[in-house]
Image (cartoon, rainbow, N blue to C red):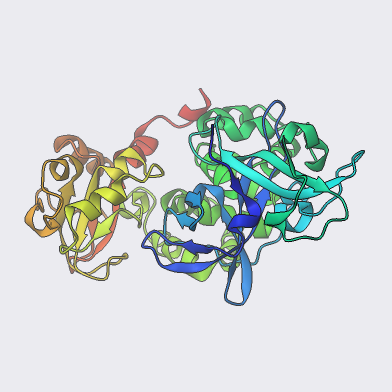
């Protein structure tokens, strides 16, 4: 039987980032409309941070348990939370709500690991008690726990036309999007959270990406750009007219917009125009165990997770002096207590951000690399070009539409 986590038990518990530092406390659980034949999915969590409440997508959450929430990363979008019409807040909207045609009210809502998705949570059960009782929630008597299907009327939009898209691979959803009229694409986008839509945007032709950004509104467009891989977001922004690009960058959180501004300074068909500014970077003092723990993150693409770039602090681009690469397979063979400084590979060396993209492809092929570092003239790491970035450029134009 799947473990059930009740919403009332996690409210006010801490939210920890990847390093274990507290960033806020759980304020609510956000649930979406249930697709046909599937339970209501947990879209994300409302998190109380100093001065505001923000939204944390379920995709950014590693674990949910009696200790609170553990995030997959240290990045947070600090924009104030505003629910969408299709979303339900468990604590705010459901707890103590009367159940139609019964004499009971909602006492609690239990979430369980999702079956149909690689990760995430769904509503599994709803705990009911007789109406009129005002005892402490955990001590209420005559409780009755039922499957969510028995009270599906609590979850609006149960016939959500596009809800099934949440369980599909982004490339498959992008294929479906191409067959939809623009207005239908916008409606389908409303059924997805920001991170899901960002993954799909990365698979769409640039003209469809631009059209979707126009239709979903400025604030959400900024949120989706923040959730996209920086190199993909920069490519999309580079295709827009200057005023529109500036408007979107201004609407983004400054710390999210700055890496994109840096990428936009480079010519499109160069290493700088191809690179991501967020490869995995660690100092030479980090241990093998610490490195492997980071590489286990299922959100990382194989190309990014294939190596760690070892740099002197700071470990955010542009970094301190670039020292070399530690390859994933090498780390698997070394003792967990060893430090990265002992296993750094200095060959091949980094490339310049002005290197033409064809030369970058040749470098990757010649050395059988998944990613190559990009450094400035002073040896500071600016980012990395991955093999999938190069494939996107060297394949024939329109290959996604075949």
How far across and down, in percent of the image, does residue 311 sit? 20, 63
159 displayed left or right of 15: right
Residue extending furthest left?
342
Residue 150 versus residue 139 in the image, above or below? above
Res 353 visible: no
Residue sitting at x 75%, y 38%: 183
Given residues 147 and 219, the one toward you in this image is 147
Residue sitting at x 39%, y 51%: 268
Residue sitting at x 65%, y 30%: 164
Residue 187 versus residue 16 in the image, above or below? above
How far across and down, in percent of the image, does residue 350 sit? 17, 54
Residue extending furthest bottom?
51
Q: Which picture quadrant has residue 327?
A: top left
282 displayed left or right of 341: right
How far across and down, in percent of the image, does residue 288 sit? 17, 52
Residue sitting at x 61%, y 35%: 166
Q: Which picture quadrant has residue 301?
A: top left
How far across and down, in percent of the image, does residue 77 sit? 54, 63
Given residues 297 and 165, the one toward you in this image is 297
Q: Which picture quadrant has residue 354?
A: bottom left
């Amino acid at each position: 039987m799947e473990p059930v986590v009740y919403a009332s038990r996690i409210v006010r518990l801490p939210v920890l980032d990847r390093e274990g530092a507290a960033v806020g406390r759980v304020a609510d659980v956000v649930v979406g409309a249930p697709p046909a034949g599937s339970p209501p999915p947990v879209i994300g969590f409302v998190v109380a941070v100093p001065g505001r409440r923000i939204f944390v997508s379920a995709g950014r959450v590693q674990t949910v348990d009696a200790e609170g929430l553990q995030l997959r990363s240290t990045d947070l979008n600090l924009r104030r939370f505003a629910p969408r019409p299709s979303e339900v807040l468990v604590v705010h909207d459901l707890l103590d709500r009367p159940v139609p045609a019964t004499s009971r009210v909602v006492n609690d809502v239990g979430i369980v690991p999702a079956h149909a998705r690689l990760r995430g949570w769904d509503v599994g059960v709803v705990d009911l008690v007789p109406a009129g009782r005002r005892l402490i929630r955990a001590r209420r008597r005559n409780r009755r726990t039922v499957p969510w299907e028995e009270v599906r009327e609590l979850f609006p939009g149960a016939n959500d036309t596009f809800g099934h898209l949440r369980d599909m691979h982004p490339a498959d959803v992008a294929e479906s999007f191409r067959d939809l009229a623009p207005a239908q694409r916008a409606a389908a986008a409303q059924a997805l959270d920001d991170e899901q839509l960002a993954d799909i945007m990365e698979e769409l032709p640039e003209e469809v990406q631009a059209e979707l950004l126009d239709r979903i509104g400025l604030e959400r467009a900024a949120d989706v750009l923040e959730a996209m891989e920086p190199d993909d977001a920069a490519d999309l922004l580079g295709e827009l007219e200057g005023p529109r690009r500036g408007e979107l960058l201004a609407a983004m959180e400054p710390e999210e917009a700055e890496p994109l501004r840096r990428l936009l300074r480079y010519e499109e068909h160069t290493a700088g125009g191809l690179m991501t500014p967020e490869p995995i970077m660690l100092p030479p003092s980090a241990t093998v165990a610490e490195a492997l723990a980071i590489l286990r993150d299922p959100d990382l693409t194989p190309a990014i997770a294939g190596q760690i770039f070892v740099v002197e602090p700071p470990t955010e681009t542009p970094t301190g002096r670039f020292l070399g690469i530690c390859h994933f397979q090498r780390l698997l063979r070394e003792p967990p207590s060893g430090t990265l400084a002992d296993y750094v590979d200095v060959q091949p060396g980094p490339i310049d951000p002005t290197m033409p993209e064809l030369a970058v492809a040749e470098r990757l092929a010649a050395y059988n690399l998944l990613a190559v570092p990009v450094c400035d003239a002073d040896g500071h790491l600016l980012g990395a070009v991955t093999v999938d970035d190069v494939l996107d450029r060297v394949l024939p134009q329109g290959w996604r539409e075949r």
